[in-house]
Each structure stands twice: as C-alpha cells, then as structure tokens.
Image (cartoon, rainbow, N blue to C red):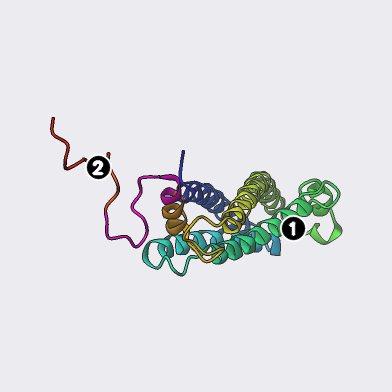
Amino acid sequence: MPTPHILRLIGSAILVLCAVVVLGISAHVEHNTRAVGYKSSTFTYDAFVGAFTIVLELALLVARLVKPAVATLIVEAGLAGLTWIFWLASGIATTKYTEEGRSICKNLDDLLDVPELSDVPPDALAMIKKVFKSACRDLHADLAFIWIGFIVATMIVGFTVVLGMRQPHGTKMWRSNYKEYERASHTSADPFADPVGSARGPVVGVAEDPDYKP
C-alpha cells in the first residue's frame, strides 16, 4: 500500500496537472479576448489560481526535502485549505460566467448586432466572432479542469486533516511531517523495530542458552 507521502505526491501531481491546463487555457483566452478589446477578471483569476497552485506545490515539495520541520501537517493543512478556497471561488466564478442566461457565448450574435458596431467592417466582426467562439470552447474545457482540481484539492485537505488528527507513537499532533508520520507508523507496526533512543539493535531470533550442550 502506498505511504501517506506517496499518496500526497500523487494528489499533488494531479492537482498541478489541472493547474497547468487551467493556467494555459485562461492565459490563452485572456490574450485573445484582450486583442479585440474585451477584458474579464474571470480569466485573470483562473490564471492566478493555476499559477499559485503550481508555485505552492513545488515549494511544499522542496520544503519536505530540504526543511521538513517547516512542512508540518498543520502548515500543509492550512495551505491546502487556502488552495481549496481559491479553486472553489474559481469554479463558482467561471460557472456563473458560462451560465446560459449570462454567457456571452449564448448571446454573441445579439451582442454584436447593435447600432454602435454598424460601422465596423464585416471582416473585423467576423474575426471578433471567431475569437469569442474559440474562447467559449476553451472556457468549457477550462471549467471542467477547474472542478476536477477542486475535487482533488478537497481530497488533499481531507487527507491532511485526517493525518493531523491521528497521533502515532512518537509524534505530536499536527506538529509532525510526512516523514516523521511514516517513521512512527512503521515503528509502531513493526514489533521487531529498534526502539527509539535504544542503543541495541533489533531483536532477532531467540537467545541461546550458554549451558546448553548438544
């Protein structure tokens, strides 16, 4: 069975993958829509969530390897909770943006068929429609990965909280890190493990009787 640290790394890998996709799609959509004069904070926020998640997960990975005392379970749980809030807000905002009643994708022809745009060359209007239709397709893919990332973030928060509330022998609740947790769990589960602080090695076999003669 995978160790808690391996499970956390698997969760991080999936979450970072979602973050990379969300960052790429959001940045692409924002770049294309800004080129035709349209701005939306939703695209910017989605890109921020993707970038923040990537940087945070990489920073936690380095902290676990270089400075494990900093990456305690309480710190991991707090940062995972913050990431969860960001993904939830991103999912809600993007979902509202793509709602049928409010979506620019559903009302694109009506929005462009106004007197103010009557002097715009047909080629320019066609380009604008093309940009927004492409952006709408990208946003639906973006939204799917956002909610997948939210689900993964939820599982990471729950997993970290469960570990923090458990207290294997030799660890302090919430103050241990993944390596200490695994070491303590292994020691308590292995009856032949070397006791913590003992100078003797593990007990192997049965002591021989010095007076015994075959």
- What residue range appears in magenta? 186-200
- Looking at the rendered image, the quarter that the C terminus falls into is top left
Is residue 190 a member of the stretch shown in magenta? yes
Query: In the image shown, does 18 or 115 lie closer to the viewer?
Result: 18
Marks 1/2: CA distance? 96 Å
- Residue placed under numbered mark 2 in the picture: 207
* Number of disc labels: 2
Query: Is residue 115 shown to the viewer in this render?
Result: yes
Upstream in the sequence, badge 1 or badge 2?
1
Q: Residues within 10 Å of mark 1 (few under 14, many from 20)?
A: few
58 on left or right of 199: right
Q: Which secondary structure type mostly characterizes the magenta part of the structure?
A: loop
Q: Is residue 22 above or below residue 68?
A: above
Residue 5: image location, x then y, percent:
46, 51
Query: In the image shown, does 211 or 73 lie closer to the viewer?
Result: 211
211 on left or right of 27: left
Query: In the image shown, does 8 or 56 lie closer to the viewer?
Result: 8
167 on left or right of 138: left
Query: What amino acid is labelled 2 in the image?
Result: Ala
Question: What is the quadrant of residue 204 in the picture?
Answer: top left
Q: Which mark is residue 149?
A: none
- Residue placed under numbered mark 1 in the picture: 120
Query: Is residue 43 shown to the viewer in this render?
Result: no
